Image: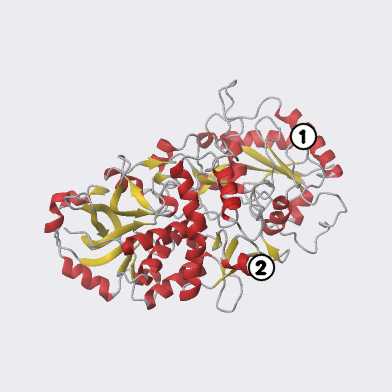
Amino acid sequence: MTMKGMGHDPSRRRLLANAGRSVGAAAMLGLGVGQASAASGVKWAREVDVVCVGSGAAALTAAVTAANAGSQVLVLEKGPITGGTTRKSGGVFWIPNHYALRERGIDDRKEDCLRHLCRVSYPERYRPDSPTFGLDQDAFALLEAFYDNGYKAVDLMRSRGALRIAQFNMWQLNRPAPDYQDHLPEDKTSQGRSLGVLKADGSNGGGTDYIDQLEGYLKKQGVEILTDHRVQKLILNARQEVVGVEVETEDGVVQIRARKGVVFGTGGYAHNLDYVRLYQRTFLYGSCATPYATGDFITIAGTAGARLGNLGSAWRSQALIEECIENRSLARCVDMPPGDSMFMVNKYGVRVVNEKRNYNDRTEAHLTFDPNNGEFPNQLQFIIYDQRTAELFAGAHPLPATPTGAGYVIQGGTLDELATNIAARLERIRAHIGTVKLAPEFSRNLKQTFERFNGYAKRGVDPDFHRGEAEYDRAWALFFQPARENTRWSVKTGLPNPAMHPLQAKGPYYALIVGAGALDTNGGPVVDAQARVIHASGKPIPGLYGAGNCIASPSREAYFGAGGTIGPAMAFGYIAGMNAAAAPVKEL
């Protein structure tokens, strides 16, 4: 059965046929909340214990958890296929204190781990001498809930056979992956927290395998997953408890009863341009999120009075500007600029960040505001590289298979010519980038940066941004940018820093234009440590739970390591599923 077929099977047809057309046109006007007084008179198309909205890591984890707790569960997905952005991912999840660490004799102590989580999530608040490490109790409780429940979600998946899970190892080094802030002294367990899925033959799987395995398990448990079902409203009873959802389908609007609770595990709002303009402080040129990531839960829960948080945040990654111009729904962002003989500069021709830092943290450099000049000097950055990198790392995204094999590649025989051609390209795309222009001193500074970087590469030390000093820089460079064989170049150079190599003294030279993109946004309704959505009054909204990119991220902007989005989504999906299943039946 195809994914599309899951949304159009006979049981779904019977559901719609039995439902009739009991809702008037007013229900189609938008997302929101149904009339509380009408809940007792609704003609329900279906009644279950728990409705899970979405079909990525968060929603499917909640569905598996609630079903294993004995609840009757229904999964609703608004798109034509399941999996959301998780399906596009590598299927890796970052979980503290999991079984594989324990099997290796590694004690990922709670206090040590929470110290690290608080330090990375709230660096401006972090206090090592505080019982909550400087955080308020609610923020601390969310991170504590992640630590306490993430490994339990993994244990459940493994014990039930819902996912084939193994330690995520970097095949180039044959060892566990380092965290994204492994150089910080608070990270006492700096390797091995990332897990991944395996295919049936024992080889490494990806996001599609992750979703397909959970779907297959849920089907065996009798849980239906209906695609092309867009939840557009909550239905509340007179006590303001969530008792169901109103759903738009290809055949009309239906109401589905949720006796115990509704769990939202939908995406962020990366592809809702109104929300992007409203909430993002600066710019978000494109996103790897599924096109269905339009922030529905913000509107739906907001109408129910939910407290909203973290709305300006995102899981960030650089994106090729000219790809975003073609289609802001991207197949892939720039995980790491490829190559050793390369660097990045801003409009002034100077480096502003360690080019080998993780994608989330590196992209923050684009958002720096200069109050003296009233501008974002790093709004666009330019990846500068030579023939060595163009050939040796050809095909490592975003480099094309041949040096000039993509229209977004800018070439120049000299650095001066490259600067001239970059300026010309900016003029060509002026309508899409606003007033960004190269500074008059760009060409002069570019040549100085070139000489400065080459000197650093020869010595193996980058005193400006410490490129290559952390294990992350070196290990993940091998993962994201494998070198090609059978070229005239070699990565075995004898130089002291494998993350840096001098650019060639003679051209040609190349440039790519990058800006701030995102895997998805991570702001929305605020939840508590029980994954309950919080009302503006500070109390939970009974019967409403959230997890994943659709809520205010429990880790805020922090990306702990490989799988830093899916790990918390699983943990809070598990928490939501457990609490929804344990909740009492709500009367109409």
The amino acid sitting under disc 1 is: Thr
With 307 as the anchor, is 61 left or right in this view? right
Q: Is residue 328 above or below residue 208?
A: above
- Depth check: give the residue in front, 81 or 552: 552
Q: Earlier in the sequence, mark 2 or mark 1?
A: 2
Tell me the crowding category of disc 1: few under 14, some 14 to 19, or many 20 or more residues within 10 angstroms, Cα based: some
One can see residue 521 in this view: no
With 94 as the anchor, is 35 left or right in this view? left
Q: Which of pointers 2 and 1 indicates the residue nearer the eye?
A: 2
Q: Is residue 92 above or below residue 239?
A: below
Contact between marks 2 and 1 (CB within 8 A): the answer is: no
Q: Which residue is found at the position 53% from the left and 38% from the top?
A: 134
Q: Which residue is found at the position 75% from the left and 59% from the top?
A: 483
Q: From this viewpoint, which residue is outermost toward the right?
A: 494
Q: Is residue 200 above or below residue 275?
A: below
Q: Secondary structure at mark 1?
A: helix
In three-dimensional space, the C-alpha distance between marks 2 and 1, rounded to whole angstroms, equals 45 Å
